[in-house]
Amino acid sequence: MRIDKKHSNWQLAALVTLRVLVGWHFLYEGITKLMNPFWSAASFLLESKWIFAGIFKGIAGNPSVLSVVNVLNTWGLIFIGLGLMLGCLSRIATVAGMGLILLYYASNPPFTGLYYAIPSEGNYLIVNKNLIEMAALFVLLLFPTGHIIGLDHLFHKLRSK
């Protein structure tokens, strides 16, 4: 029996798997930052290059603003990850995830001529893991699964009763 008339069960399974895997990545990144009392976004922001470097370095140089950014980044990752994994407010989580990754990408883009002191895990030119994950989230935005398999589906059923 097909769950959704527009997509095969295999297509839905692939989309839900993608949603859960991306959600796990966000959640795990947030939890590791939460559990490390010495974590700060400062080193990442200070490495910023390109046209927004001044803004990102300004954030890193202001302890009050940096503290807020650290909290927002950590809890944003956690809530986005939970939303994606559970299919709860999945559209909001997807858009928020795309926005957060866009900020990461804008801060440290993999463009020719930009060199960073922090070693990367590979060699990139324009396309890096952030851009790929943002594209995966865009696919999930276009093919939402939370309303079919997730808490969004349960909430919709409860509201309609």
Image (spheres, rainbow, N blue to C red):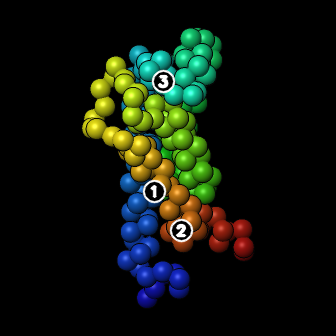
Displayed quadrant of residue 158: bottom right
CA–CA distance in space, label 1 to label 3: 24 Å
Mark 1 surroundings: few (<14), some (14-19) or many (≥20) residues within 10 A:
some
Disc 2 element: loop
Mark 3 surroundings: few (<14), some (14-19) or many (≥20) residues within 10 A:
many
Question: At label 1, which amino acid type do we have?
Answer: Ala
Disc 3 element: loop
Disc 1 element: helix
- Which x, y percent locates residue 134? 48, 50
**Which comes sooner in the sequence, label 3 or label 2?**
3
Residue 3 vertical placement versus 25 (above, below): below
Q: Which residue is mark 2?
A: 143
Residue at point 37%, 23% (across, down): 116
* Depth order, front residue of 27/121: 121
Residue 138 vertical placement versus 111 (above, below): below
CA–CA distance in space, label 3 to label 2: 33 Å
Q: Which residue is mark 3?
A: 48
Question: At label 2, which amino acid type do we have?
Answer: Phe
Residues at circles 1 and 2 in contact by the CB criterion of under 8 Å: no
**Which comes sooner in the sequence, label 1 or label 2?**
1
Of the 4 image quadrants, the one containing the N terminus is bottom left
In this orientation, does residue 61 appear? yes
- Which x, y percent locates residue 16? 43, 65
The label shown at residue 136 is: 1
